[in-house]
Amino acid sequence: MVFSVSLFASLAPYVVSALLLFLLLEQLSYLVKKRNLPGPLFVPPIIGNAVALVRDPTSFWDKQSAAAGISGLSANYLIGKFIVYIKDTELSHQIFANVRPDAFHLIGHPFGKKLFGEHNLIYMFGEDHKSVRRQIAPNFTPKALSTYSAVQQLVILRHLQRWEESTSGGSRPVSLRQLVRELNLETSQTVFVGTYLDKEATNRFRTDYNLFNLGAMALPFDLPGFAFSEARRAVTRLVETLAICAGKSKVRMAAGEKPTCLIDFWMQAIVEENPPPPHSGDEDIGGLLFDFLFAAQDASTSSLLWAVTLLESEPEVLNRVREEVAKIWSPESNALITIDQLAEMKYTCSVAREVVRYRPPATMVPHVAATDFPLTESYTIPKGAIVLPSLFDSSFQGFTEPDRFDPDRFSETRQEDQVFKRNFLAFGWGPHQCVGQRYALNHLVLFIAMFSSLFDFKRLRSDGCDDIVYCPTISPKDGCTVFLSRRVAKYPNLSLI
């Protein structure tokens, strides 16, 4: 014991010196990579500013954007990772245009590969990426979108009825955040894998997805008991469940049965190919489906919440939506909105697009630099840096009065979605642009049409209720708390649909 204490005492100065040297080199490495970029001059050792990010993501990213200022770039440090935040739209385009093995890799989350696993469309390049996107194309044909539209509406209507019942006829307010998440999770599950999930599997799926959401916002400590570790294991289980669904669908489609959900349209094309295309094994499909689920579930939850928030604050917009929808579809018709009718709702579609522009759900798209990349004449992004093009900042550049919620900017007269196309990045850009954007917009338009037609609603306003919070996509701080009351004599008769 005396010898051990003596040995420790003799080694202590060297250990302390080594630790101090490590911390000094860490700071120097950060400053060398940072060079002339705005950003903190000193970062906390090892964890960097991760605590500030987890404690208040909104404030953290607002400060990062403010620091970028005129230059369009700023720097920071998170758990051993040097990050570059990109505010300027044209600089963001340089990242999106150079997603390739020797430039930038899309990672979807600062610690995405560890969290999502390897089987994911966002990590693919070149022919592999093109091959998978070709496989996915049948999922979003007009026929497929029409099939999904019916499913989406049935789920939306079922949940809207439950919402009104839970508010005791509008006598008490309700926070929509969790309710919308549940609506979207059921919609995604039903549209993507139909009846291949039984009730028990559906409940497990919901539990695992909630674990994933919590871990996506937590510090990335991959140790037992930590939220990030629980999320990583939950993703593995989710992918396994989706892989089983893929196998069941292949059997049905090989037997010539009619597609009833997204995975059926996908597997129908795959079973017709001989030999099967690359990345079409059940486990591969499960990983790709999880990518779809993540994109559809959380992004749509954000957009639906902001749609209610913005419609309530803009009575004129809400009235125009109601007038347009009433000319095309009536709840008393006991019929679903057809794809053709959906296409007629041009103003409602403009509202949906403006919701997505004004509050893009995924505010940033994380990439990692595979090599040193000269982004500007004065700054080269160092290899290994996490690069964060801001879709949110781009949404407020170029457009006419960008800080104003104005659906008419997307009218056939103004066409700001074309005039300022390079700034409308809510669905990404380039080879990795969102493949399901038509589906996502249809879902948002259907929700807006039905919600505004069936309900009168009023926000329960509180200080900062419209402030942005990250969970992990953005939503109103109060979870969009509203009073709901039915504005129609009766709901559509679902038994007749």
Image: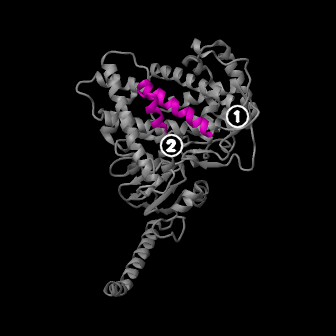
Instruction: Quickly name the residue at label 2.
Output: 210
Residue 41 appears in view: yes
Q: Is residue 275 left or right of residue 212?
A: left
Q: Which mark is residue 311?
A: 1
Looking at the magenta stretch, what is its main secondary structure? helix
What type is the residue that disc 2 sits on?
Asn
- Residues at marks 1 and 2, CA–CA distance in whole angstroms: 28 Å
Q: Can residue 436 be found in the magenta stretch?
A: no
Q: Bin the neighbour count of mark 2 within 10 Å (Cα to Cα): few under 14, some 14-19, many 20 and up.
A: some
Furthest residue in direction left, as rendered: 275
**425 or 288, which is in the foreground?**
288
Q: How many marks?
A: 2
What type is the residue that disc 1 sits on?
Leu
Q: Is residue 229 shown above or below 199?
A: below
Instruction: Give the residues drawn in magenta, as a range.
Output: 177-206
* Residue at (45% x, 52% y) in the render: 228
Q: Quadrant of the N terminus?
A: bottom left
Quadrant of the rendered image containing residue 400: top right
Quadrant of the rendered image containing residue 251: top left
**160 or 39, which is in the foreground?**
160
* Residue at (32% x, 85% y) in the render: 7
Q: Residue 285 placed where, x, y %?
A: 35, 34
Q: Secondary structure at mark 2?
A: helix
Q: Secondary structure at mark 1?
A: helix
Q: Quadrant of the C terminus?
A: top right
